[in-house]
Amino acid sequence: MSQQLVHVKIIINEKAYEADIEPRLLLVHFIREIAGLTGTHVGCDTTNCGACTVILDGRAVKSCTLFAVQADGKKVLTIEGLAKDSKLHPIQEGFWVKHGLQCGYCTLGMIMAAYQLLMRNPNPTEEEIREGISGNLCRCTGYQNIIEAIKYAAEKMRGGVS
Ligand code: FES
Ligand code: FES
């Protein structure tokens, strides 16, 4: 039985994407397959890994656990929208400088979670950073260099690192 399609318009990284979709389509699949932005990943089917994290209207969300229709008319920021004029965002730079990634599969989610954390708390303690990324799993790094990357970014965003 074919489902009725719903027309949606989602603004991703300041560009509008419109499509007729099934109501059951997950936001992560809209982002990857309709918008073609494959930096956002899927690492589980139970909402625990965070590899699908994006910013929806200013809040970090797991895009595998929202329907695309729930984002209709809203603004989404994905990893592809962070760099400006080919210049890395300080969080991206921090992951590079501090070796906060290996396979890179979790990296986009870690960066988006860190983005929300630093928007809310520009000077987090190590404990607050660990808590802030506790919805994001990494199988490679052991987390320590991710913490260093976020500390680096926080300092740079506060104007401390040139
Ligand atoms: S894919 Fe694992 S939490 Fe979304
Ligand atoms: S760098 Fe491989 S999962 Fe985090």
Image: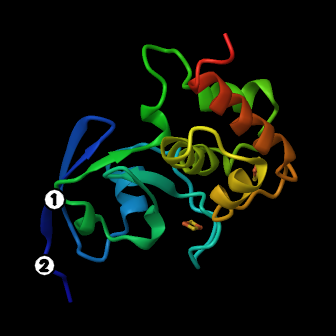
Q: Which residue is mark 2?
A: 4
Residue 147's disc number: none
Q: Colour mode?
A: rainbow
Element assignment for label 1? strand
Element assignment for label 2? loop
Beta carbon at label 2 within 8 Å of ligand 1: no
Residue 107 in the image, given as x and y percentages of width and height = 66, 45
Question: Which image quarter holds the N terminus?
Answer: bottom left
- Please state which of the two labelled residues, at mark 1 or mark 2, is closer to the viewer: 1
Res 15 visible: yes
**Residue 150's quadrant in the figure?**
top right
Please tell me whether residue 65 is drawn above or below residue 134 in the rendered image: below
Question: Which image quarter holds the C terminus?
Answer: top right
Residue 147 shown left or right of residue 159 in the figure: right
Please tell me whether residue 126 is drawn above or below residue 52 in the rendered image: above
Residue drawn at x 16%, y 54% as measured from the top left: 73
